[in-house]
């Protein structure tokens, strides 16, 4: 199974809502990533988890809160978002970080709209 | 901020044409370069992981070369097919941060 799944596929939320994005992989990968992708732009790294510990936080606002409850799951908790946070949120995993020697497997993304 | 550039931004070719595009990246602190293909409504899919200067990787009709000293990588597609239509992204991984910085991508359209 080389699939990374993400739920939900689409999410519309108000600026006062709290919601969560979920990502799951069963490839035994020990590195997991969250990216944000705006239209016609490349994916921008947000967070990296390595062996369930937060390894990289790219100065992401605190209204985005990542969580890695176990080696297969990665969540992104959302609270008090702004309309400019509307984007495609991509999850990815790789065997481990090892300085980027392993390719990343991406999920299909969650299309988030903040109203 | 790392500067990873891809050119051209878009490319339109006829079926059967061969084509190539470029990814330019900083020549210092290189660790690895990844190529991904991203088809519309699908997930980005890894094509190659390149680590050594002079690396040449091949997968079917697609191949890539790497020059870390001058900071560029080429992706070649031989005999393009309509199913090759996609955005091709490169991602630079540096030694300092171990994180990926993506280029803006080259969008390839292959007309039958």
Image (cartoon, rainbow, N blue to C red):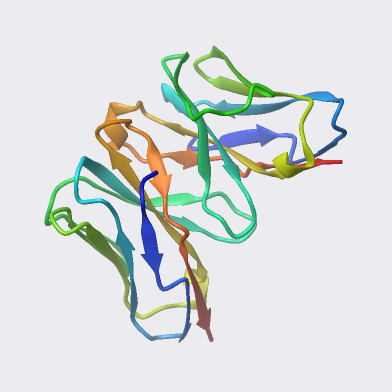
- Image quadrant in which the C terminus of chain A is located: top right
Query: Residue B38 placed where, x, y %?
Result: 51, 57
Residue found 29% across the figure and 48% down from its top: B33
In the picture, measured across the screen, residue A80 lies left or right of residue B52, that is: right
Query: Residue B98 placed where, x, y %?
Result: 32, 32
Number of residue marks: 0
Q: Residue furthest front?
A: B1
- Quadrant assignment, res B81: bottom left
Residue B101 visible from this viewpoint: yes
Query: Residue A112 placed where, x, y %?
Result: 75, 41
B33 is higher (above) or lower (below) than B11: above
Residue A28 visible from this viewpoint: no
In the picture, measured across the screen, residue B75 lies left or right of residue A4, that is: left
B97 is higher (above) or lower (below) than B46: above
- Quadrant assignment, res A62: top right
In the picture, measured across the screen, residue B27 lies left or right of residue A108, that is: left
Residue found 58% across the figure and 20% down from its top: A73
Q: Which of A93/A57 is in front?
A: A57
Query: Residue A81 placed where, x, y %?
Result: 76, 31
Residue found 38% across the figure and 60% down from its top: B5
In the picture, measured across the screen, residue B100 lies left or right of residue A44, that is: left
């Amino acid at each position: 199974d080389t699939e990374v799944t993400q739920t939900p596929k689409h999410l519309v939320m108000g600026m006062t809502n709290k919601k969560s994005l979920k990502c799951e992989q069963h490839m035994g990968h020990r590195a997991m990533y969250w990216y944000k992708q705006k239209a016609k732009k490349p994916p921008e790294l947000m967070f990296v988890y390595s062996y369930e510990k937060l390894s990289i936080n790219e100065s992401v606002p605190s209204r985005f809160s990542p969580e890695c409850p176990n080696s297969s799951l990665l969540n992104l908790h959302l609270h008090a978002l702004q309309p400019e946070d509307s984007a495609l949120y991509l999850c990815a995993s790789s065997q481990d970080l090892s300085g980027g020697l392993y390719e990343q497997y991406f999920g299909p993304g969650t299309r988030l709209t903040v109203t | 901020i790392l500067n990873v550039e891809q050119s051209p931004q878009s490319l339109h070719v006829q079926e059967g044409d061969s084509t190539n595009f470029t990814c330019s990246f900083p020549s210092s602190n290189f660790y690895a370069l990844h190529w991904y293909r991203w088809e519309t409504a699908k997930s980005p899919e890894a094509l190659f992981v390149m680590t050594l200067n002079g690396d040449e990787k091949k997968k079917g009709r697609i191949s890539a070369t790497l020059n870390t000293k001058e900071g560029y990588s080429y992706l070649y597609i031989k005999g393009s097919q309509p199913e090759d239509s996609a955005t091709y992204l490169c991602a630079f991984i540096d030694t300092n941060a171990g994180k990926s910085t993506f280029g803006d991508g080259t969008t390839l359209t292959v007309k039958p």
